[in-house]
Amino acid sequence: MKPKVFIARNIPKEVEDYIAEHCTYDKWDRPELIPRDALLASLSDAEGLLTFGGKIDAELLDHAPKLKVVSTMSVGYNHFDLEAMKARGVMGTNTPDVLNETVADLIFALMLAAARRLAELDRYVKEGRWKRGNNQDLFGLDVHHKKLGIIGMGGIGEAVARRAKWGFQMDILYHNRSRKPAAESELGAVYCSMDELLQEADFIVLMTPLTPETQRLIGEREFGLMKPTAVFINASRGQTVDEQALITALEQKKIFGAGLDVFEREPVSPDNPLLKLPNVVTLPHIGSATSKTRFDMAMLAAENLVAALSGKIPPQLVKELRP
């Protein structure tokens, strides 16, 4: 008998067909996110769950006594209660690497947009405020030949560093839990302390996973170390930054600008002060949002799910749950 799975969001038909070859399934097929109570009610006989987010905790596991694997279509898995999953013997998988280049594209877009004030000046033109003159008040910052600091030199960080080095002739600084000899050799990347990076970099890209250690990693002290001409980019998780400290740094011009794809609370509140500031570019968490990459993520999540339910160790089993 095929194992039973629940698919908690819309996925491409080809991915659904792949799952159907190996499993029986129910699915949530509405455009809006599945409500928590509807998800819990759908898991009583599920052995596998394909999801994109939402807490995987003791409450959910209580409603899913047969559950063997949760496969998330994301790199981040901070929504996994790892201790609860470990206690129940439930595997958890994610989708690293397939989105690296796509997210790196977006990070570089944020760097360029924040440095050259693209969103601000787009509004300036559309509002009919462009007049003849020397327009010095519209000047931005160069990106080429500047110094890039990357906090969290994983696959995405390395993809950003390659764009910076070979496309914009930037010098690369990085801070990471471990050194990356290959990146140092290929890109001339220089490993340094966090404080050194914050003080020296012209552009600072935060790409750490969200863990208890990285919660509010960047706050008032860290913004105080940055250059007044620094541009700060966050495409990791909103909770890795003290958002009020960022707002203060932008309001008081302690840094030049910021580019954000993530926020402490998502969707971001319409009254969040960040949305009123001209020196920050704000995006709706779209780092991996291209059709091809989202297809690849969904297929990888499905392959992880099927592998786990076939008695294999899935290739993207998260490290904390590996035997």
Image (spheres, helix red, strand yellow):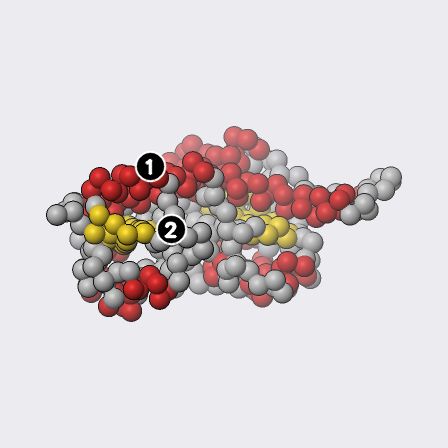
- Residue 204 in view of the camera: yes
The percent position of residue 318, horizontal first and vertical second, equals 28, 51
Residue 180: where, in percent of width, then height?
38, 42
Q: Residue furthest right?
A: 132
Assess whether mark 2 and mark 1 are in contact (beta carbons under 8 angstroms): no
**Closer to the camera in the image, 188 or 49:** 49
Residue that badge 2 annotates: 29
Which residue is at the front of the view, 114 or 285? 285
Q: Going from the N terminus, do you reach mark 1 or mark 2 first?
A: 1
For residue 149, side relative to residue 300 (left or right): right
Which element is circle 1 on? helix
Q: Residue at x 60, y 46 (%)?
A: 202
Question: What's the amino acid at mark 1?
Answer: Glu
Position of 42 relative to 114 (above/below)? below
- Tell me residue 85's x, y (percent): 24, 62
Determine the image quadrant of residue 78. bottom left
- Mark 2 residue type: Asp
Write the residue at 45% across / 38% down.
291
Q: Nearer the viewer, mark 1 or mark 2?
A: 2
Q: Quadrant of residue 220?
A: bottom right
Residue at 45% in and 55% down: 32
* Residue named by callout 1: 14
